[in-house]
Amino acid sequence: MQVVIEAIEADITTLALDAIVNAANESLSGGGGVDGAIHRAAGPGLRDECAAMPMVRPHVRCPTGEAVLTGGHRLPARHIIHTVGPVWYGGDKGEPALLASCYRRCLALAREHDFASVAFPAISCGVFGYPLAEAVAIAVAEARAIADEPGSLSRIVFCCFGPKALQAYRDALAA
């Protein structure tokens, strides 16, 4: 089955898909940006589910570059895949490999759970400061890398907040 990869401009918390991806912090405690919006929209059940996850080291439930799965709670999406993107320090501290790992881990979880659809925000492009063009190139490359693999995944959505991000994703997908 061919995987459709698309970019849309929308509020990720409104999407009725198998899973949406949360650009989380390592403690999975909610925060600002898309993380805060997802936590607010999902309600207190998400906070409780995240708090019940074991720490892998002090204050860390999900290390940078990894991903974990929770229920969607009050969201139209059935599940939330939480991933922690890297903070941008100029690109020479392993940021590209960590960001690519975020996408690979999320897509692996989607496949492992037989999801047909998943939506991503622009991971690390908010307060973590990752340059949009570089992040988009990584996101699109990782999505394309799994597009021909067998499995239930049939739709990958890049959910953009604003026209600048939307155009960056559409340009990368057209290339």
Image: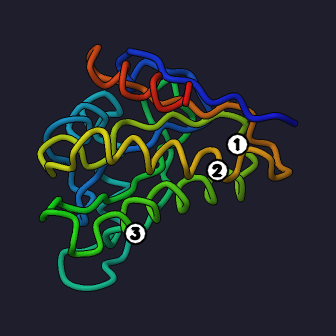
Local crowd size for mark 3, using a 10 Å CA cut-off: few (<14), some (14–19), many (≥20): few
Question: Which of labels 2 and 3 is toward the front?
Answer: 3
Q: Is residue 79 left or right of residue 5?
A: left
Q: Is residue 141 above or below residue 84?
A: above
Tag 1's secondary structure? Answer: loop
Numbered badge on residue 97: 3
- Circle 1 is placed at which residue position? 115
Q: Amino acid at mark 3?
A: Ala
Q: Amino acid at mark 1?
A: Phe
Q: Quadrant of residue 161?
A: top left
Local crowd size for mark 2, using a 10 Å CA cut-off: few (<14), some (14–19), many (≥20): many
Question: Which of labels 1 and 3 is toward the front?
Answer: 3
Residue 173, image x, y percentages: 54, 29
- Circle 2 is placed at which residue position? 110
Residue 170, image x, y percentages: 47, 22
Do callouts 1 and 2 mark residues in contact (Cβ within 8 Å)?
yes
Numbered badge on residue 30: none
Residue name at image x 44 percent, y 43 percent: 21
Residue name at image x 43 percent, y 44 percent: 137
Do callouts 2 and 3 mark residues in contact (Cβ within 8 Å)?
no
Q: Is residue 123 left or right of residue 171?
A: left
Q: Quadrant of the C terminus?
A: top right
Residue name at image x 57 percent, y 35 percent: 78
